[in-house]
Amino acid sequence: MKPGTLARLRAAIPLPTGVFLVAAGIYVILKLVRPVIPHSVILLYMGFVILGLVIHVTLRDERMRRFAEFFLQKGTGQSRSVRAQRLALLAVPPLLLGGWVFEANRPRYAPPVEIFQRHPTVGEEVLGRIAVPDWIAAAPAQWDARFVSDGKKLYEANCAVCHGEKLDGQGVAAEGFRYPIRPANFQDPGTIAQLTLPYMYWRLTVGGIQNQFNSAMPRWVAPSDNPDVSTLHSYDMNEDEAWKVIAYLYKATGHEPRR
Amino acid sequence: MALIIASALPGLAVAQGSPLPMPDYAAPALMDSRLAVWMAAQLHLMFAAFVLAVPMFALFIEYLGWRARKTDPASARRHDWLAHEMASLLPIAYSLTAITGAALGFLLFTAYPRFMNYLSGVFGPTFIVYPLFFIAETLCLYFWYYGWARMQGERKWLHLVLGLALNVFGTIVMFIADAWATFMMTPGGVDAQGQLVSLYDAVWNPGWMPLNVHRLIANITFGALLCSGYAAYRFLLARTHAERALYDWMGYTGNLIALFTMLFLPFAGYYFGFELFAFSATYGVTLMGGVLSWLFIIQAIVIATLFIGAAYYSWLGLLRIPGSERQQAWSSVFNVLLIGGFMVWATPHTMAASLEESTGGFHPVLGALGVMAPKMIAVTLILVVLYGSYLLYRRAGKVITVPWGGTGERIQWSLVGLTALAITALGVYGYFAPAEVRIRTSIWQIIVLMGGIVATFILDQFLMRGARTVAEVQWGRMPGRGQYVLVALAVVIVWLMGLMGYARSGARLNWHVFGIMEDTSAGAGLPSLGEAALVITLITAIFFALLAVGFYISALARGEAAGADPESAGLLAEGERA
C-alpha cells in the first residue's frame, strides 16, 4: 500500500474505529455461521479477539498515542466524520455492554445453559469389574464375522432409529433429542474411537436416562440381580448381544476400541 | 519434616500388626479434610517447586558468569549479581516449604490414618531416606546462598559444585515425593489386594517418570516467571535508571527461561497423559470426556494467556532496540496467528448451548476442532510462531554480514514454513486415523517441530556469525506495561499450577490409591467447577500473601539499600550498559 493511501485510510478510519470494526466484524461472522455457534463459544472466541486487539494497539507507543488522542480530541483539524466516530464509539460499546448485561440477567423460561459431559464419568470400581469376552478383546480383524453380523441385525432393529442406519447419529427419531445432546454419531472420531470396550459395554447396558447422566440413552440390558428393572423399551438385550452390537459399531465405522 | 518421620514410624509399627484400633477418618482442621489437605498440599507444592527450580537456573546463570570471568569481567559480575538476586528469594521460600510441608504431613496423618498407614507400609524405606536428602539439600542451600561472598574468585568453583549438589539433592527429594504421589494414581509393585510385592516397582510405577519430567520442566517455568514477576515489581519501584536496567534484564531473562521451557511443557503433559491413559482408560474418560473435561477448556484458556502474555512481553522487548522496526512489523502478524491458534486450541468438543442454540451437543463445523488432532496442530504451530518471534528478536539491531546471508535467510524461513506444513499434514492425517495412530502422529509432530527448530537454529548460528550490531539493547527502556504483564504472568502460572494440581489429584475420583484403596470418607466427592476455581483462587491468594510477607522479611534482613551500597551501585551503573 502506498504511504499516501495509508495516511488517507488512517485519517478516515482512526485506530479505535478500526479496532471496533474488526471486533464487530468477527462477531457478526461468528453469529452468521449455521448451524448457530453457541453463545458460550462466541464469548470464548471474542475474549481472544479482544485480547489480540489490545495487544495490537499496545505493541507500539505510537499506536497507543493515536488511540488515546482519538478520545482526548487531540490533534488538529479533525473532520466531522472523525468527530462522529468518536461520539459513536463513546456511545455504542457501553450500550452494547448494557444490552448484554440485561440479556444475561433477564428472567426466562428456558433451561439454563449447562456444561455437558460427552462421556459420563464412571469409576474404576465399576469398569474394573466388567469382564470383556476373549473374542472381542482380540484385534478387530480377528472378530468372528457371524458375531458382527448378529450385531448388525440387533443394531438395525433397536439402535438405528436414533443413531441412524449409517451410524451417523441421524436416525429418524434423532430430531426428537436436540437438547442437550443428540444421539451419538459413531462415525465421529470423538465418540467410540475414544472409548474402551468396558466403557462401551457400561454405557450400552446402563444407559443414561435412568441414571441422570443428562442423556436420553436408555438401559439396554436388565441387570441379573434386578431383571424387572425398567429399560423403557420392549426388547432387552442379553450380555452376549450387547457385545455383538459393540463389535458391529467398531467394524462398521472402521474405528478401533481404545486399549 | 521431623513430623513426617515421627508420624511415619508409628505407621510402620501399625503395618506390622499393632493391636490399636485406628479410626479411618478424622477432621483435625475442623473442616472437610479433603479441602484442608488439598490447600496444604498445593501450597507446599508451589513453594517446593519454587525452591527446586530457582537454584537450577540461578546456578546456570552463575556458571555463565564464571565462564566469562576472563573474557568479560563486567558481564561476569552482572551474571553473578543476577544469580544471587534470584537466589536471595530462596531462604524464606525454603522455610515456607518446610512449614507447609509440616502442615500437610500433620493433616495427612491425622485425617487419613488408615491410608497413611498403608502408604507408610509400602514406602517405609523411602520415608527414611527422604528426610536425609532433604537435610542434605538444606545444608547445600544455606551454604550456597550464605557463602556466596566468601566463595568468590579462586573458590568460585567450590560454590558452583555446592550449587550442583543442591540441585541434585533437590531433584532426588522431588523424585521420591513423586513416587508417593504417582503411586496413588498408577500403583505398581503391589498385588491385587494392595500387598507390596516390589518396592522398586512401587517407586517406578507407570506415572512416576512422566510426572518427574513434567514437574521438572514446569517447576522451571514456574520459578522463572515468579522471578521475573519479582523483577518487574522491583523495576516499577526503581528510583534510578541503572536500577531499572538491571531489573529489566532480570525480568527479560526470567521470561526467556520460562518461554523456552514452556515449549516443552505441552509435550511433557501429553506424555504424562499418555501414560495415564495407558494405565487405565478411565483416566482418559474422566479427564478428557467426563467430569474433569471442562477443566481442560479452562486450562487451555489459561495456558493461552500464559503463552500470549510471554510472547507479548517479548514483542514489547523490541521497543528496547532502536532500529528494530522491521521486526516490530512482524509482531502484529504473529499476534494474529497466535490468537487464531489459541482459538482452535480452546474450542470445546461438546458445546455448552442453550435450548435454542443446541445442535445436539456437537457442532458440525466447530466440533471437529474439539478433538486432539486439530488441537495438536494448533499448539505445535503456536510453538513455531513463538520460535519465529525468537529468531526475529535475535535479528533486531543487527545486520547479517555473511555473503550468503540472503540465501541463508530464505532457506531458513522456508524450513520454518516446511516444518509448519509437515505438522499440519501430520495432524490432518491423524484426525482421520484410529486413536493409537493419532497418538503416534502427535509424537511425530513433536519430532518434526524439534527437528525444524534444531536445523534452523544451527543455521542461525552461522548466519549471525559476525553480524554487525547497529543498535545496542537499551535495558531499562521497556514500557511499564511490559512489567505489569510479567506480574500478571506470575499470577497466571500460580493459578494454573493450582488448577493442574487439582486435575491430577481429582482424576483419581473416589480412590486414595487408584483401584486399590477407596476413599470412603464423607468428603470423597469432587467439588463443582466453580467451587474448585474458588479454592484454587484462594490458594493463589494465600501463596502470594505468604510470598509477599516472606520477601518483605527477606528485604528487611538485607537492608534494602542497593543504591546506597557502593558495590551494588557500581554494578548497577554497569547494568545500564548491559
Image: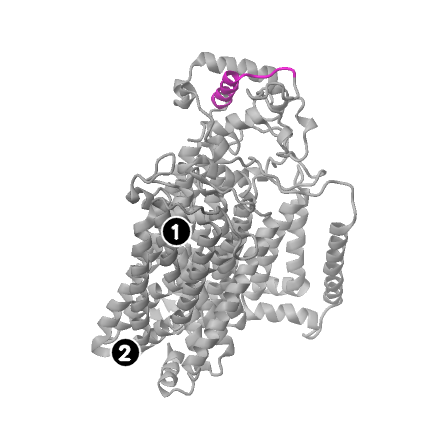
Which range of residues does the magenta coloring cover? A234-251
Toward the viewer: B68 or B139?
B139
Toward the viewer: B236 or B93?
B93
Please indicate whether residue A96 sits to the left or right of residue A252 in the image. right
SS state under label 2: helix
Residue at 26% x, 78% y: name it.
Answer: B152
Q: Is residue B561 above or below residue A151?
A: below
Toward the viewer: A196 or A22?
A196
Q: Which mark is residue B73?
A: 2
- Find out whether residue A245 is within the magenta segment: yes
Number of on-image labels: 2
Q: Is residue A37 above or below residue A247?
A: below
Whether the residues at callouts 2 and 1 have beta carbons within 8 Å, the answer is no
Q: Which mark is residue B214?
A: 1
**For the residues tagged 2 and 1, is the chain the same?**
yes
Would you identify the image quadrant in which residue B140 lies?
Answer: bottom left
